[in-house]
Amino acid sequence: MSKNKSMEEVSVEQLISNYNLVVPEIQREYVWGLNTHGILDTFISDIKEGYKSHKNDESKSNKELEVLNKLFLQADDLAKDSIKKMILGLGINESPINIGFLYSYRPDYYVYNDRNEDVYLIDGQQRFTTLFFMLFYLSIKENRKEDFIELFRFNKDLEQIAFDYRVRTLTHDFFIDLINNSNSIDDLQKIQSKNWFLSNYKNDITVNSIVGSINGNSLTGTLPILHNHFEDDNNKYFDYVKTQIKFWHFKTEETSQGEELYITMNSRGQQLADNENIRAMLFEEETIKENQLEWSEKWENWQDFFWKHRNKKDYNSSADNGFNEFLRWVCILEMFNKNVRLEDEDGYSTDLKKLIKGDNKLKLPVEYLGVKKIEQLMNAVKYLFDDFPDKLRAIKGNYTLYKNFTLISDGWLSSKEKGLTQIELFRLLPVLQYISIRLLNDITVDDLHLFRIIRFFYNLRQDETVGKTPDVQLLNALDLVSVMGIENDDIISTIKLKGISKSLLNKEETKKLTHFKNVEERQKIETLFWISEDHKEAKGKIIHIIELAERACSEFHKKFDSEVYFKIHLAYRQLILNHSKIWGNFLNTKLYNANTDRVLYALNLYKNEDYLDCAYERYKKPEDTLEVFFEQKQKLFIREYAAENEMFEETSYKKQLYLYYILNTQIKGEWIWGGNWNFGVYNNNEDYSYHSLFKDNKIFQKYRQQWRYSFGYNPQNGICTQHNYDPDFNYFQELINWANK
């Protein structure tokens, strides 16, 4: 996980692999185990429901893709569109559960190292503590305690763990004692009767919340409630909770910021400005006084609009938050239109930067407001949120395979007190500027072009540059639609216009727009590109798939077309949907890097050169099943060895691992990954119960996140041929015989 991003979506595993989370003294006690209002029951039920959906999606996608692929190859032209629709939909809705924000800050003793750093947890404590004990309970139930210990780096001798209430001695001691002394579900059910359970623990609110109240009439205690939910459930939840429950982790970076954020998080100050006070000031203008009744009626209509779009689930909601936020949009756009740039000549931030960032201490700059400016933007807002949804029906009819049309959120009009985020403004304000320019000039808005603009900014929200500098990129986006003006209403016009930021119109976006412009059936290729962008592993970036399609078209001297792209996309997605089943076939590729004591898989694996080459080969051999496809590749690899002695003398760790993989899957049985994708390398000089098949006498152990050579060899994660070695079996000759069948 990158250390320089202030906010990113992370799983428990990703978070804990980089940080030691400490609950500071300013945090309240853990109380979810008291189960007030059933919050813990609801939380657990939501996770179990998410697991059920996850497993259903995973199972269905793998089976259905194989069948649909065969049908597509045999189908006539009339049936292919229907089959495409089903194929392209596979896997799109596979997504983890995001349970909200988790805020942290560095303590004043912060020292960074290349392994783990301490950070203080200032919001998200209740959720993360619950997940911590859920993982501990599941690790006991599923015989995965060692995995739990490895994940949280538990060291009983040093009394250290990667999630800790360490500033509260009693709570900290309970955590250490509980983990050290609990090895069965029976241990967890009888905690309070154990010798290690000190009488003082009963005085700790957090401990009572975890173990439950002895005299309670209803079920309390995190561990008893977890047992109630999972006791009779035979599903394996540990890996799902570890990798698929995610937070938006926000790092405040400085101690003072962190403590200030905690103190003010749930008690933010007054909104940027009160729209009623602004109304009073604006109505003092002489031109408004002359038609005060007319403008008063308009103002009431505007308030009614935000009342209609308020958050109806909140009984205390009103029109004020949405209207106040709308006035912020007016100020931002007017400051932009009057060329009030992001920074002054001395490099200091201006009010525009604060306004974009949503500084709640800043009063709205009313000098940039006026009822006519408000009316102008209000017309654009009404068009986008009231008129355009009905017009989308006709657009949907032209994109039968594409389904993601809800790209503008109605919830933005019932904004919470803090207002829209910078990324949300990046998606919305350029669209409003685009509409406003056309309405102001009495030009009919082309709704298809409008949707393409919306889609363009919706996808760019995932771009790394946009994420790092959303305030700057918002201004670049406003520049883009302004340069388009009234004559160039189609997004593809930007590729020939001057003055467009390269941060937005980068190589990938230029390539996409160029293909949209040049292909004969634009809506077909748009459909395929948009669907590809929406797959979770793409994160909006598909230039690697486009370039594979360009390669295929060039090889066969064809123009770029949607059919070739679709087939490339199909081959690429098939590899991804079968990721866990085929992963070992990439051991001897650039997806793995080897050094003296470990073999590590690449993080950006789906865009790796060898992964893409494999997808291209798969595109050229669609008639083979995946099993046959990879079996042929394995046999070609084995045939590179002239004799078994050459295999015995192999020194490449990657090739050795690949040979082990082929041997264990094709000759000896199944290779069990167990979620371990990295490998540590040992010298087999001490323990002769493990046997390397190779002359250099190296043995391998699988691991997940962090390699701990000093922990010793773990046969559970070792390559099975090493510790189930049969001296009478000629392993390499068997491989050669198999490869030459």
Image (cartoon, helix red, strand yellow):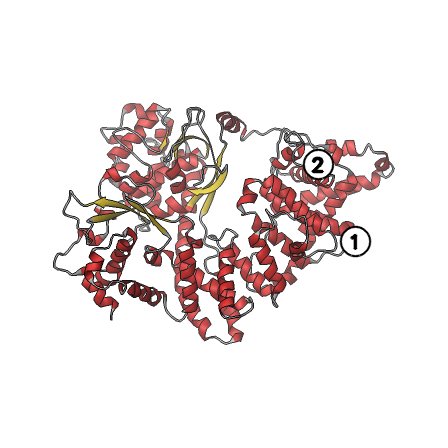
Looking at the rendered structure, which numbered label has been put on residue 340? Answer: 2
Say which amino acid is labelled 1: Asp
Mark before the other along the chain sequence, 1 or 2 = 2
Image spot of residue 326 (x, y percent) = 68, 40
Identify the residue shown where x is 76% and y is 43%. Answer: 375
Say which amino acid is labelled 2: Val
The quarter of the picture where residue 58 lies is: bottom left
User: Which type of secondary structure does the marked residue at label 2 adopt?
Assistant: loop
Residue 543 position (above or below residue 166)? below
Give the camera-side residue of 462 and 33: 462
Q: Which mark is nearer the camera, 1 or 2?
A: 2
User: Which type of secondary structure does the marked residue at label 1 adopt?
Assistant: loop
Looking at the rendered structure, which numbered label has been put on residue 442? Answer: 1
| Observer able to see residue 53 | yes
Image spot of residue 144 (x, y percent) = 28, 44
Identify the residue shown where x is 24% and y is 33%. Answer: 181
| Observer able to see residue 309 | no
Give the camera-side residue of 732 and 277: 732
Image spot of residue 497 (x, y percent) = 68, 53
Q: Residues within 10 Å of mark 2 (few under 14, many from 20)?
A: some
